[in-house]
Amino acid sequence: MLESNLMSKSRDNPRGKKTKTLFRENPMLEKYSYFCPSSITFLNLNMQKLLLLGDEAIAQAALDAGLSGIYAYPGTPSTEITEFVQNSKFAAENNIHSSWSVNEKTAMESALGMSYAGKRTMVCMKHVGLNVAADPFINSAITGANGGILVVAADDPSMHSSQNEQDSRFYGKFALVPILEPGDQQEAYDMVHYGFDFSEKFKVPVLMRITTRMAHSRSGVVRKKEVRAQNELKMPSDLRQFVLLPNIARKRYKNLLRDHASFITESESSPFNKYIDGPDKSLGIIVCGIAYNYLLENFADRHVPFPVLKIGQYPLPHNLVEKMADECDEILVIEDGYPIIEELLKGYLGRGLKVKGRLDGTLPRDGELNPNLVAVALGKEDTFGLPVPDLVVGRPPSLCSGCPHIDSYYALSETLSALSNGRVFSDIGCYTLGALKPYEAINSCVDMGASITMAKGAADAGLIPAVAVIGDSTFTHSGMTGLLDAINDKSPITIMILDNGTTAMTGGQDSPGFGKIEDICKGLGVEEAHIRVLKPLKKYHDENVAIMKEELAYRGVSVIIPRRECIVAIDKRMRDKFKNK
Amino acid sequence: MKKDIILAGVGGQGIISIASIIGYAALEQGMFLKQSEVHGMSQRGGDVMSNLRISHHQIASDLIPFGQADMIISIEPLESLRYLPYLSGEGWVITNIRPFNNIPNYPDIDKIMEEIGKVPHHIALDADATAKEAGSVKATNIVILGAASPFLGMAYEKLEDAIRFIFRKKGDKIIELNLNALKAGRNFADQNM
């Protein structure tokens, strides 16, 4: 939906009219102002219009819709939702919970607990975070909700900052819960209110699926006039609702299946699913979320000559899809992410409807959509600028100059130089950049925590010594359980916990294990003599290499903790200190 | 009026500040705006770009189609070339010529300048040096903005107002410095168009 479609006429573009514009610095953005020195939010009084990132629109909406708590682990592109609430004065004044969770699973479960207690709650994560939270998420569909619960999953088509481009709509379908997918920032705002209402009406969690482009693009958002009060504490009417013993779960599941029919009916009348008629019935277009904007971009007057079904809510509106199938010769499906709708309509044997999209090459099978790809899919002429000159080379991200990981990697690489290559299992964070030149120091990056367990498995197979490299925040996210596995097996592995005191890659959020890393390792059973803390600095290089050699020679679990604060965090801390003087 | 702008640079060079100033000025004039930003992994010294679209009419796509950008504003010469596929035939490249060299295979700067020279409409200036003359090398991005100002379709004073507003908490001295930087960039463009 276009940004102004939802605005009343009087709020619409007041061109020629002198508008008084207030401008306020967005406090949340100061948190990572190292990167965004003056990211801003505008507040235009006449239009009552905020210029918000998709993430910020969702957060603002949640605050306006009576949120009692937000739960999340940072992950691009979802991080800014929670940060907005953390930096909101309103949230602080109203005692709205917003501190980071240790991982997405604990976040999802805490949110479910808040819902159990009758309050409205939001849980946010990047798409792969939903893998971590999948167990409570899928089961929350069976328990159902009490207070409204909205699960926001931010997908990353084209993998701007991720290891895959999985489509969270699959999870919604899998769990049989309704899904909301906004087409612009205003819709993102409006859907949050709608989602909470839906969740409380049908006592079911609602999934909101956004993409990087929606999360990190700014546009005008008009807030609702009224801010809703938080719910009172209210127990579930049936105190066995959340007890998923088989005989209760069976009943709950039947309830969910029964309600699923209602979810389809709701989709059919949803304000977010729209059938926009067009005279040319040779083609019907089903378009989801933000892809609608790319479609409109291709028509100067914004009038598409074909019937268009814009999808913003799932399960699909059965009657509207049927209408399109009945009156159009063929259907083009434009969806960012996986070809979910396309596959559904096409059927396994492809003998049903004539459907075009990502599966037949009308659109690419992978990657983020854009206006040009949609133009080509519509049979329009593609547009081109000048070619990129041959001399243009890539400029990949790299570890910051002065980053402690650099010293850790140089020491580790020297330590391992006498051994055969390929022994370092790493994890997800800034230090994953150690895979690139000039370091080329690591050999894996799979999912949060996999460094320790993969090193253990490789050691079990006979690769001795094997090394795991994991950040402090990733360690508490999902590394601790794997460490216990290794300890119980007395696996000959060395684990380097790169402790820079922050969750750096996502912009420097609090690290849940801050000041507790050695105690956690000791508590799990790592022998004290084999927990070695060192300072990753060039001047201690030889000393650090010697320590690493000693621990690599030990045939059991050893933990090395190179500890030095992230230089971006120091820079930020110093500037804050200066600012407060 | 509608302007589609690609902002380019290296993480931390201040392209978001440029977007903020143009955005503020556009909103002051009751225009619509969409701006797609880069957060996350790509900012660790990697190339960054932002799509900034301002218009008196509703804007559909968050992304500018290829071959349709009115200008590429770049704080780094190599980066100004990376996004040429977005530039329209009539479009302008406004770029800094001072390289930010954080990669081992950075191309020869003379060859880069040669390629910039091939773009039909371009303004290339040493914004670092100009900013230093204006008072601080930190205002490099504002010099570039000044050099782009003739093409933004808005009165120069609107950008000055935006700078006064955006830097209002930093004190008069910083505002003055940035206004000087803006002017220096503008003067260069006026003389080299």
Image: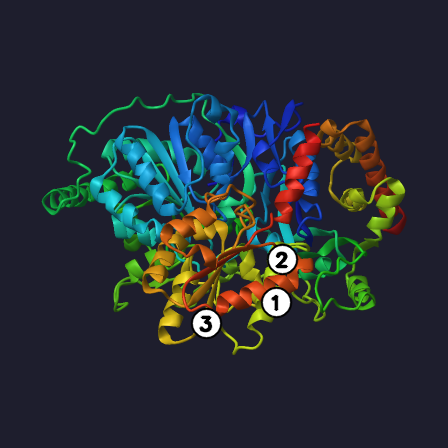
Disc 1 to disc 2: CB gap under 8 Å: yes
Residue A402 image-quadrant placement: bottom right
Q: Is residue A145 toward the left or the right of residue A532 in the image? A: left
Q: Earlier in the sequence, mark 3 or mark 2?
A: 2
Q: Crowdedness of circle 2 by 10 Å Cα count: few (<14), some, many (20+)?
A: some
Closer to us: A39 or A536: A536
> Measured from the top left, where is residue B41 in percent x and y?
56, 54
Badge number at residue A465:
3
Closer to us: A463 or A144: A463
Residue type, label 3:
Pro
Q: Are marks 3 and 2 on the same chain?
A: yes
> Measured from the top left, where is residue A60 in percent x and y?
47, 31
Element at label 2: loop
The residue depicted at 75 percent of the width and 60 percent of the height is B101
Q: Earlier in the sequence, mark 1 or mark 2?
A: 2
Residue A274 appears anywhere in the view = no
Residue A433 image-quadrant placement: bottom right
Q: Is residue A406 toward the left or the right of residue A104 in the image? A: right
Task: Check the residue under mark 1 and report the chain it is in.
Answer: A
Disc 1 to disc 3: CB gap under 8 Å: no
Closer to us: A40 or A498: A498
Residue at which label 1 appears:
A439
**Colouring method of the image:** rainbow
Q: Earlier in the sequence, mark 1 or mark 3?
A: 1
Residue at which label 2 appears:
A399
